[in-house]
Image (tube, coloured by chain):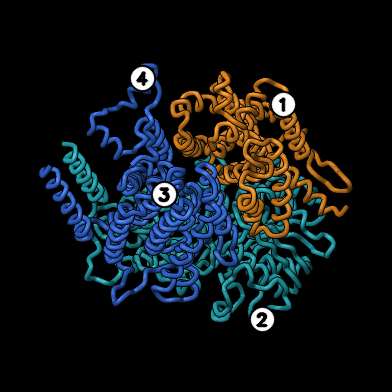
Amino acid sequence: MGNEKLLRTIFTVAAAAVLVTLPLFAGQYTITTCLRIMHFGLLAISVGFLIGQGGMVSFSQTAFFGFTGYVIGLLGLERGLPFPLPELIGLAGVIVTAALLGMVALRAYKIVFLMITLAIGQIFWAFAQQNTTLLHGWAGIRGIRPPVVLGIDFQNPTYLYWAGLVIVSLAIFLLWRITKSPFGLALNGIRESPRRMAALGYPVYWLRLIAFVIAAFYAGLGGILAVYTSGIITPTAIQLSRTIWILLMVILGGASYFWGPVVGTIIGVWLDVIISGITGRYNTIIGIIFVIVVLFSPNGILGLIDSVRQNQKFSRLRKYLFPNASPGKQNRDPYERR
Amino acid sequence: MDAKLLILILNGLTQAAIFFVLGSGLTLAFGLMRVINMAHGALYLLGGYIGYSVAKASGSWVLALIVGGLFIAVVGWIFERFMLTRVRGDDMAETLLSVALSMIIADLCLVFWPPQPITLNVPSDLNWPVTVFGVTYPSFRFILMGISVLIAVALYLILYKTKLGAAVRAGVDDRETVSALGVNIQIIYTAVFVLSALLVGLAGVLGGSYLQLSPGVDGTILTFSLVVVILGGMGSLSGAVVSSLILGQILSFGLAYAPQYSYFLIFIPMAIVLAVRPQGLFGK
Amino acid sequence: MSKKLIAVLSLIIMLSMVLSSCSTPTSTPAVEEPEVSDAASAVDGEIKIGMLSAFTGVFSSFGKMQKEGAELALKEVNFQAGGKKITMIYEDDQLDNEMAVTKAKKLVEQDKINILTGLVSGDEGLTVGDYMKDKNIPVVVMYSASEDMTMREFHPMIVRPTWTGAQSMDVFGYWLATEKGYKKIYAIGEDYSYPWNQGGGFKRGFCRGGGEEVKTVWFPPGTTSDFSSMIAAIPLDQGYDAVLYNGAGGDAVNFIKQWAELGMTDKIPLLGQSNTFEKPDLDSMPSAIVGSLSPHHTADNLNTPNWNTFRDKFVEAYGYPPSAASEFAYMSMRMMIRAIEALDGDVSDPNKLVEAMLAVDLSDTPRGPVTLDPELHAAVQNVYIREVAMGDDNVMFNKGLFTVKNVSQFGPYDTELYMAQPIDDNQYPPDLCSEFPAEMLEAGNTYEFVPFGQD
């Protein structure tokens, strides 16, 4: 349909134009908020990729997010290694750690995998929280500043914003390619039916491991951007409530959609800015929204838009109100479908 | 025996008492329903806070214990009946709903209770210095241990001497077959979930009487409960007993000799178990 | 049709995000100098002061006291100074340093505050101070006591009319070594910057006064509820004269309860850091600790006209007596108000504002006369050695024993010598006095201890 394509192109161009020219007309705080959306968005993509593509729910992505932050703080700030060494070491470290931990964690099935990743995330947190000699415990490492690269001083928030925009766009593009590649399709197959894929000769365990490592890389990338935006890395960056919040953002946007995590993060951060001006009860409101989403639109906001489009208007709502009317659930598993 | 060593062991036993009450409900619920109740920590906190208010208002700690436990049991029942049943069978959705519940409860606690750490006041007729082998130790901690043992015995009786218990044990082993056999699995789920909630409510009052209740504790408690369950084995009560005892001692000695790593040390047995025997010490 | 819907919805969302920050652009790519905060708010007739504190978490009682103290000062002038209205914006950083930066950004970038104040814990202060380095907005530190904010990490926008961690503890350590003859102390401390600073000051004073050792064990704050194992590990047979608990807030209450439960009150004297026995935490502690000593810049039984006026007003407004955190916030706020008055409400030049603050006469401060050091903007003030006592109304309070006047943040040391030393942390200063650098063991001026109430 030519019309749709035209609309989509116009939309994309307009959105891109707005995003690129934002610093020229928007306030400082908007830029700060956009940077937050960017780094949390990368973390959300990391979580969403595993859930949507691979059917695995991992609670240790936040740990990888904080890992690069700590490496930059320890090596870049405290020991003075220049850009891009700490960043590269951080990302390499994340990949290696994810590979090792993934090898252990992926031997388990779904819920146990979740518990193991939760435990891994918490181990990182406990170590960061309590160890003062190296990681400075609860106080964290402060005073981290973005570097000067090729003469551009990224301490200027506008430059940092543009750099972030480039990085995030590249990352999303790369993910798009991965998703559509044979690897991505194989991953989808494993998500649907691991036994069948194994029977077909696919190395299920290793494919999942690769996906886990890729996701960890994205989380680490987000962590780099985060630590430059806020200038500090503390254990709260990797605590359980942060992990839960990111998961909520992903589900809110729609776990089985490519853009779901990003949409969810935009909404989540935007709500934070708005709500915190009115009340401190952000968590309660988000929690309630989440309950509504899980019960009535498990495919998130994008799923809601989709079902409105497909005229399945509020079919879940109908089923909730009149549970006896329609026999049983249809086998639509929103956490695994694409 | 060296006085210091004795106190450390007693501390470990006190800690184990709390761990057991925390882990027992979670392990049964998980073993049977394959759902991790992520709101476990938040329910602990809420139970503790309710107990705190009851104790403050009435002056009776025992009443606080009873009310705290029952209140959370009711909360658990409401949650199970009206929300979990809607998504029954979908493990992910059930887990996510409990996540949402944990956020809401933890946040609402901030509205009704003070933001700084508080402890339940234990009346002095329950807490007097006891001298054991030349060491002074507060009696209340022995009471904690005693209550925990009572709970363990009660759970064993329920699990091994009643029909409900038999159904639960069968369900832990193989839930599809159990429901195929015509047992109303729904009632069993609800019963176990409510029992789990009751236990965590009690744990909240018990723990809140000797540790602190404050925002953020829910995350730590959830983590500890999960460690107890993973180490002991999902669905195994004896596993919960053994892992509580082990972890309690580790925490106690860790706090004495390496406080910087006290949490970290707790994760080590869990990590070992996950690598070597992922179903836990006593799990299937 | 729905694609259009999505497109329109997203554009609306984006536009509203842009508009919700509702301000004129303040950053342009070409300019590399630090941003100057929008002067619009001063011209509007409103002065915005942001208070960033820990209103949730293990030190939240201090955050609450800060708010109360500040509001008392504001109520006295009807929230007006220099003809302009003062608007307070409170933000809770939940004792999380990352959140502190996020909220500071919001206050600076979105709310466009003229002054930033508040700050409870040591690390909050250091973190926010670091963020505010190039923002050109005065930072008035109300309680955060990590000394480096007015020493090694100082920048001219920081004004701290309150205290540093070492200031009172140096006096305390010295007094214990010289007057009480203590030689060995066993210290249990919270492992972060403020107790490090308090411990550092204590060790310096103690060793200078002739002590031998302050053996210190550190634990992670806020995550250790059960201290009984740590208490059990205290070696009672190695000749320690006292145990110093170097922590405060919820942790302190727990520690002391368990201390009493394990029967330690009969075995060895207990000392506290400055905040350990502060009210209202003191009210939750068992009465067995009567007699325990701690130092601070206030004492609950001060009896000067300035203190009494303040205390009565505070009790009338809130129903309970004030403690150090409340007084600090009160006099800081008063200083800001007086500075704004002196400038006739024109706060457009931050440098002039800071100068005005430094010029305010603080001799009528409730806790005792205070002067501000013009170089590093830190307070020179009284130190009181106090003891926990039981009042006639069966409520415990901190009874002043001795006063030392005009103590600076460097104690008796020379400024350069002091700042040349390594920063206090959990390894430095060393536990054994014999390992101290020799020049730190002598100091030009020593303290003069005046019995309380007779100065």
Q: Which chain is blue?
A: A
Helix, strand or loop for disc 2 = loop
Q: Could you say where residue C179 lies in the image, as x and y percent from the top left?
A: 76, 67
Chain ID of residue with mark 2: C
**Image-based side of A222 in relation to A308, left or right:** right
Quickly name the residue at label 1. B160
Query: Do discs 3 and 2 belong to a common subunit?
Result: no
Considering the image in quadrants, where does the N terminus of chain A appear?
top left
Check disc 4 and report the residue beneath it: A326
Q: Residues at badges 3 and 2 in contact (C-beta under 8 Å)?
A: no
Q: Residue furthest top?
A: A324
- What whole-number distance in Å separates the C-alpha atoms at marks 3 and 4? 33 Å
Which label belongs to residue A50?
3
The CA span between labels 3 and 2 is 56 Å
Q: Are marks 3 and 4 in contact (CB under 8 Å)?
A: no
Label 1 element class:
helix
